[in-house]
Image (cartoon, grey):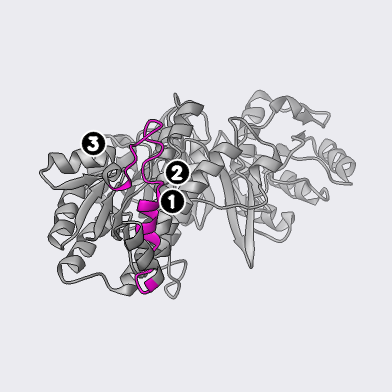
Amino acid sequence: MAFALLSPYDKSGLVEFARVIKEAGYDLLSTGGTHAVLDGAGLPVSQVAEVTGSPEILDGRVKTLHPAIHGGLLARRSNPDHMAQLREHGIAPIDIVVGNLYPFRETVARPEATLDDALENIDIGGPAMLRAAAKNYPDVVIVVDPDDYGRVGEMLAAGGVPLEERRRLAAKAFQHVALYDTAVAGYLRNAPGEEEPSQLFPDEFTAGFKLVGILRYGENPHQSGALYSRDGGNGGGIAAAELLHGRAMSYINYLDADAAWTTVAMLPSTAVSVVKHANTCGLAMHHDQTEAYRRAFAGDPVSAYGGIVGFNTTLTAETAEAMRPVFYEVVAAPDYEPEALEILKKKSKNLRLLKVTPESEPGLALHTVSGGLLVQVTDRAEDDRSAWKVVTERQPTEDERADLEFAWHACRLIKSNAIVLVKDRAIVGMGAGQPNRVNSAHLAVRAAGDDAPGCVLASDAFFPFPDTLELAAEAGVTAAISPSGSIRDGEVIAAADRLGMAVIMTGNRHFLH
């Protein structure tokens, strides 16, 4: 007698798969709720308690943790001593295991979830059973993913599951358990509001992500690529966005769409961003969405061609109509008016339209380096405006201050060394990714052109010399915002006073590399 032990939390497709397993000659064995499902479907199935001789105890916490189960899983069929021990103790081999684990991530993601809820969803017997089966994969078929039922069922019907497929299934089972354990460890390690580095950055660190899909290629055609989501797609963000229209997203599309979305998602009122090569080339905030779009587009019409547009409010038909003349690769928005969706679909069959749910929480930012991983807290915190200081003789006007606040937000989302010129809560010029700040300022002034007079300037880091402000003032810039910290802050402030500029120093910086 050989058993197939079935005990998955996710019972999608289970009954059909169980029938295939039964027809392949295995006796079905199960626990609690799974037994009720199979029995209710008319399948002959034994209770685990009948095999172990022990009832389920402690509200189901102890069911499969028994030698009669783990002996049947771990015995090597090619080892005569192992098989003799099974016979001596009356233990039947278990040749197939179908299982997956409690919904821990989904449980703790609920706002009303308590510690007791979390602890009750920490699976103990399940991981032990899956690991035992996977360890002995040459003799035991382990299936954790309902998507594998069809293929494995065909193999069983054809006479058996080949060794290489068993190995693949075993690797998937270990990864399934590892993802689960990562979620539990993260929950227990980080209490709500906990920001101590010792808790955020433990001695051993794993990150849990679930495959969304294989991409056509990575950054370049010779590189393979894939997209993974945090929390199985339940955490929101670009990785969990719904593609409403257009061809499949590429690796670079995802990078640019993320930049466009995060730029506007952090703003407090209606805003539109235009991104090219992961840099914000257009950004505007206005109570009228269509006007915000027009201003964002005007920030750099040349770069906008083939770019990505991000919205933080439902995209309207009026705005969709205004977008019609321009070629874009991707649009990202929290939702679309039905008429807007139709307008954009007709605009191009290839235009990718993403419906994005805001992230439940940003979490940690990960960046690979050769041989390792850099980890940091995501830079999403609001600045303490009370710490900002006007360091010049001239105070900024009310309009300048509003533009400076907007420019400071825009600057933190542009690659260093970043210089941004803003007027009326819209970018009119920017320079990014240069080896020095003056080069970025030259680019920003040149991009702004005739619109430079009356602009304000934001710099993502301190001014090492007065030259950036001198260049900006010559173009007509009237005010600036930057961190402090240069050994020449005094010279910079003196130059600003000489030029009649108002300067705010924030006390903190926002590099983006």
Q: Along the line of sight, which residue is nearer the eye, 219 or 391?
A: 219
Q: Main secondary structure of the magenta part?
A: loop
User: How far is mark 1 from mark 2, CA to CA?
Assistant: 7 Å
**Label 3 with label 2: CB-CB less than 8 Å:** no
Above or below, 348 against 39 in this view is below
Q: Which mark is residue 360?
A: none
Q: Amino acid at mark 2?
A: Ile
Characterize the local packing of mark 2: few (<14), some (14-19) or many (20 or more) Cα atoms within 10 angstroms.
some
Could you tell me residue 256's position as x and y percent?
Answer: 47, 54
Percent from the top left, x then y, of residue 126?
39, 47
Q: Residue at coordinates 45% horizontally, 43% vertically from top-left?
A: 124
**Can you name the residue that lies furthest to the left here?**
42
Q: Position of residue 6 (x, y in %)?
A: 27, 50
- Mark 2 and mark 1 in contact (Cβ < 8 Å)? yes
Q: Can you see residue 136?
A: yes
| Residue range of the region highlighted in magenta in the rendering | 51-80
Q: Quadrant of residue 358?
A: top left
Closer to the camera: disc 3 or disc 1? 1
* Residue placed under numbered mark 1 in the picture: 128
Vertical side of 421 occupied by 158: above or below: below
Of callouts 3 and 1, the N-terminal one: 1
* Residue drawn at point x = 42 percent, y = 47 percent: 238
Q: Residue furthest front?
A: 88
Helix, strand or loop under label 1: helix
Q: Report which residue position mark 3 lands on.
A: 338
Q: Give whichever of discs 3 and 2 has the lower sequence position.
A: 2
**For numbered disc 2, what is the local secondary structure?**
loop
**What residue is pinned by disc 2?**
124
Residue 8 placement, left or right of 473: left
